[in-house]
Amino acid sequence: MTRVPTIDLFAGAGGLSIAAARAGCDVRLHVDFDRWACETLRTNTHHHGGEVLEADVASLTGQGLRKRARVRRGEPLLVIGGPPCQPFSKAAFWSEDGDDAAYRRARANGAPAPKPKQHGHRPDARRFLVQDFMRLVIESCADGFIFENVASLLAPRNHHMFAALLEQAHAAGFTTTVVRANAAEYGVPQKRHRVFVLGSRRGRVHAPEPTHTLDPEIETQTRPAVTCGEVLAPYADESLFEPREIIEGRWAKHLREVPPGGNYKHHTAWAGHPRPTFVTETRFWNFLLKLSPDLPAWTIPANPGPWTGPFHWESRRLRTPELAALQGFPDGYLFAGSRRERVRQIGNAAPPPLAEPMIRAVAEALMGKRSSRKESALTCAA
């Protein structure tokens, strides 16, 4: 089958690009504004191919991208991308207005949860990159697109942005399929919830079925979810030691006492601790959070705090190759920059095994039906 020319916007460390290459696409161009992400992409072209363009998407045009990617008239074009998710994440909801502390105090005291305050802060400008994504999809005369973001984009406070994206896509002649997916159900050793929009001008794309299950008691054709123990075993060798993995400081002893799969609640009266340090529901759930070797990981964050997990069950920080493995990156994939930069890139990435079936579904739809010249003229002026 002919490979579909593909452009990856907001490419980051290359999670979607790896997935696209595995799905049989011809990834011709990666676009990102971050210098370290671009260096990572250039270092790993053998995993996905394509030119790297370090640029702000707001300054680009769709036809300029099409020309840069050398997409000829008549060739199908697929545009993929995950605009920055931070403005839509749960962390943004709880931190940008300072409502998290009030919520936790209310829960601890048995009072009703307070309504979020309106502080009049300036909205995160990155919210509007969703509009730039759809603008470039339309301007480039793409035949299909895959949009990826956090599942909380569907929450009431963000839904207007999501609805606007769908409205733009439909007005431009796309049929869309919305998929809310848990990465662990697609072979990623991590419970990471994401939303995908699969867009095609050539008919509806069917959502890929999960390949794994988190409930082994249910008899299905799917396989059990992949566990942390399975994936992290090759990275336990001390030759991979990283100085920053050592935990020292105020809560180091507390962390060592937390059992695998537990968090700070181990040190509460709720958990039966004889000398409790904390009160349940007064800390973020990932405070002193440890992985369990028998389960998939929790979401890998891009900017973890000094005491927020997940930590390794051996009471240390995860090594960067371990973080990459939990995201589904291929072994030996190299990330540029300091440890902080590498962790940020990994945490922001889309897990390739989750994105691959989504991209394949759209690519197959594009190659399975060639639109007529008349049909193309109705939706694109190229």
Image (cartoon, rainbow, N blue to C red):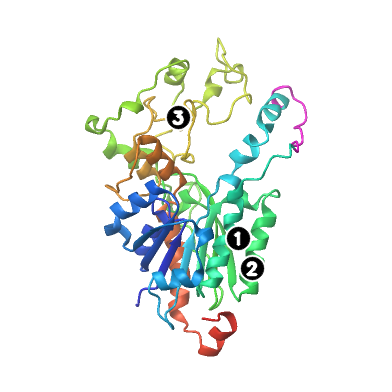
Q: Quadrant of residue 8?
A: bottom left
In 3D space, how far apart are the residues under numbered discs 3 and 1 (Cα atoms)?
37 Å
CB contact under 8 Å: marks 1 and 2: yes
Q: Position of residue 116 (x, y in %)?
A: 74, 37
Label 1 crowding class (10 Å Cα cut-off): few <14, some 14-19, many 20+? Answer: some
Q: Amino acid at mark 1?
A: Gln
Observer able to see residue 52: yes
Q: Quadrant of residue 169?
A: bottom right
Instruction: Give 195 or 139, whichever is nearer the viewer.
Output: 139
The residue lying at 43 percent from left, 59 percent from top is: 31
Residue beneath disc 2: 168
Residue beneath disc 3: 290
In 3D space, how far apart are the residues under numbered discs 2 and 3 (Cα atoms)?
42 Å
Residue beneath disc 1: 131
Q: Which residues are magenta?
A: 107-118
The residue lying at 47 percent from left, 63 percent from top is: 80
In 3D space, how far apart are the residues under numbered discs 1 and 2 (Cα atoms)?
9 Å
Residue 117 part of the magenta-drawn span: yes
Q: Earlier in the sequence, mark 3 or mark 1?
A: 1
Q: Residue furthest top?
A: 275
The residue lying at 61 percent from left, 40 percent from top is: 92
The residue lying at 37 percent from left, 74 percent from top is: 70
